[in-house]
Amino acid sequence: MELVLTEDQAMLAKTAREFFARTSGLVRLRRLRDANEPLAYSPDVWHKMMELGFLSMPLPEADGGLGLGIAETVLVTEGLGRELAPEPFVPCVVLAAGLLSLRGSSDQKHAYLGPALAGKIRLALAHEEADARGALTSCRTAAQKTQTGYRLNGRKTPVLGGQGASAFLVAARTSGAERDRRGISVFLVPNDAKGLRVERLVRVDSLNAATLELRDVEVPASAAVGELDDALPALEEVVDRATVSLAGEMLGAMSSAFERTLAYLREREQFGAKIGTFQALQHRAARMFIDVELSRSVVMAAARAIDEGATNAKALVSVAKARTGDAFVNISNEAIQMHGGIGMTDEHDIGFFLKRAKVAEMTFGDGAFHRARFATLNGF
């Protein structure tokens, strides 16, 4: 497995990095947070991402996408992560649009996927529930058969990218018990459906998320996305793809936090010397560098394993998420400590990286979840 970028991939990585640097993601994130902007991202930046092909990139050409792989997708998310850009690329494109591409009918794709790739609407996947902790089989939301379709009742949280979404792909049980693998189905629910309540979640990382309350939400039979009772394999596939894409975003963010810390070590003086000359801080910075490079290797390995259909792809996804979760939290903690008192203030940007790290660590399963998953997949 090659763990180096091709010429085209290197060009894509450069384009993504320069684009998100120009959009001043961290500056925008602070401004949007301070203004309490409900959408929590910039529609004009989202439109420019569409023009660059980012929204179409991870989807197959048959669905109007560019047909590129996760190896290319993580190059975009790494650039996004470096600037802590708030655009919901992973949840709305890789996750929600990815699932609709995988399981949707031609009519559903025409009505929702095409406009989503054109940047006209956003889709969100509502699959998580309280206390699920990454377990996709944990689904208490119920879909009861009616004469004309289905009636949905339940609560989904957090729904990443859910605030302001035009439609939701809602995972609900059509049969079986809460933890059964069989019995989970997915339904398309427009945001104006009667009985649907979307409540904004204000999170520590200031990104777009929501809670969905479904109370006797009626949908027609044609709203079912794919076969009934058998959505779990598709959910596992798109969540794995989204997990590696998120790991790429975490890699970009930890790299930026590390570089900002190195710059501070080179300029801050104490006791008549640059603090970067202190051996103890040099050792800690060296450990941060090792964490970044190990994370880069496992993210690249997982992305290529998915694209190649490798038998150990699922295990490598869990390795990547567990490794990047640990590394990002460690690097952001160290970054604040090395910045000293100023790092503890909201006025300094470095604290935003720790906030993002703590949320990203838990998203799509934390380190404990993925280490247990890795052990199970390897027969332990």
Image (spheres, helix red, strand yellow):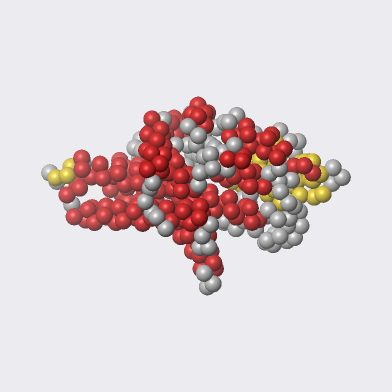
> From the viewer's perspective, is residue 88 above or below residue 141?
above
Residue placed at 23% from the left, 45% from the top? 265
Image-quadrant location for residue 120: top right
> From the viewer's perspective, is residue 276 above or below residue 21?
below
- Decide which of 81, 128 is in the foreground and name it: 81
- Decide which of 216, 166 is in the foreground and name it: 166
- Decide which of 38, 88 is in the foreground and name it: 88
Rendered location of residue 121, percent (x, y): 61, 32
Left or right of residue 61: residue 154: right
Left or right of residue 189: residue 292: left
Residue sticking out furthest to the right: 147
Rendered location of residue 95, percent (x, y): 57, 45
Query: Is residue 94 shown to the viewer in this render?
Result: yes
Left or right of residue 258: residue 100: right
> From the viewer's perspective, is residue 163 above or below residue 3?
above
Left or right of residue 289: residue 53: right
Quadrant where the image shows the N terminus? bottom left
Rendered location of residue 221, percent (x, y): 79, 44
Query: Is residue 92 shown to the viewer in this render?
Result: no
Rendered location of residue 103, percent (x, y): 67, 47
Residue placed at 68% from the left, 61% from the top? 181
Residue placed at 51% from the left, 60% from the top? 310
